[in-house]
Image (spheres, rainbow, N blue to C red):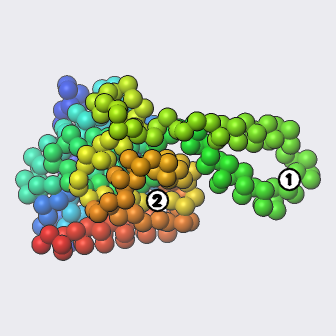
Amino acid sequence: MNITQQPVVFSCQGSDLIGMIYVPERPTQRAILIVVAGGPQYRAGCCRNLVELARIIAADGTTVMSFDYRGLGDSAGYYQGFESITPDLQAAIDALIAQVPAIKEIILWGGCDAASAALLHAPSLPQVTGMVLGNPFVHDETAYAKVVVKHYYLQRLVDKSFWLRVLKLRVNVWKTLVSVLTTIWQSRQAKPRTAASQTHNVNNETLPYPVRMCHSANRFHGRILLLMSGQSLVSKEFDELVAGSPQWQAAIHRPGVTRVDFPDADQAFSTMNARQAVIATARQWLNDWAAETA
């Protein structure tokens, strides 16, 4: 199916934001809004992977929009951080629907802290009925230490190349030992702060963001596609947190949530094979959803 690429400029609290909409010839009622990860990234994504994604998905009939929220890429304003972009997302949704009136439902797509942003803000965005989340970012020192011990140091102990470097004095053994012992001590500390508690006030913005993410995930009743990388410590940290929290488990292990693991993929799904696998998975998920609700 042919697609049209439409640049768009829209306002968010007085700042001009820049976006690109990929519109198919016959758009369906669902559209994808790509939430860009923070830091140096912008709406095209790493190695323009979001452009490739948008064009392929749009060719199937699903409109896709990517944009730079305030302070990122080409958009004006001050950088808000992923915890504070509800107004940006709502402004983008409004701009998308204004350009393509056939759209009735929005799917948020994001990776790393953009996945965290989607989980945080989705319940307050009435048009959002689905999310595609890649390796959500939920950093906690205790959980991270456990992940490093399990998935980094233990692997190095059976890595032949590591021991060859030790024998050739290319590794500072004392420094490495101190690092290992410190990390083990951190991993044995109290239960991670970010495990959600039923007693928390869900509207308390002073709570750690992973706690608020958990509450938001439990309030969100739409569909979720989780894309998890086998070679990402961020992905493993998320799993560590979920494993220790009944509230997270209730949010993630429910009908409507689909998880797909990519054992050889890194955090950014940076290889061609990983990107193709992610796109194929998302297309199948969208097609299955469309068939169920036809």
Task: Write the residue at 20% across / 26% down.
Answer: 13
Disc number at residue 114? none
The x, y position of residue 37, in whole percent, is: 40, 43
Q: Residue furthest front?
A: 199
Cα gap from disc 2 to disc 1, whole angstroms: 32 Å
Q: Looking at the picture, tell me which residue is in the foreground, 133 or 44.
A: 133
Task: Write the residue at 72% across / 55% down.
Answer: 154
Query: Can residue 117 be spotted in the picture?
Result: no
Query: Can residue 283 be spotted in the picture?
Result: yes
What is the secondary structure assignment of the residue under circle 2? strand
The x, y position of residue 274, in whole percent, is: 48, 65
Task: Write the residue at 22% across / 68% down.
Answer: 289
Left or right of residue 196, residue 244 in this image: right
- Which marked residue is nearer to the observer: mark 2 or mark 1? 2
Left or right of residue 127, residue 160 in this image: right
Q: Residues within 10 Å of mark 2 (few under 14, many from 20)?
A: many
Q: Residues within 10 Å of mark 1 (few under 14, many from 20)?
A: few
Disc number at residue 165? 1
What is the secondary structure assignment of the residue under circle 1? helix
The x, y position of residue 120, in whole percent, is: 32, 40
* Quarter of the image with the N terminus in it: bottom left
Left or right of residue 65, residue 294 in this image: left
Q: Which residue is mark 2?
A: 228
* Dots 2, 1 in contact, CB < 8 A: no
Q: Of the residues under marks 2 and 1, which one precedes in the sequence?
A: 1
The x, y position of residue 220, in whole percent, is: 25, 49
Amino acid on which disc 2 is placed: Met
From this view, report whether residue 241 is shown above or below residue 10. below
From this view, report whether residue 87 is shown above or below residue 63. above
Amino acid on which disc 1 is placed: Arg
Left or right of residue 97, residue 108 in this image: right
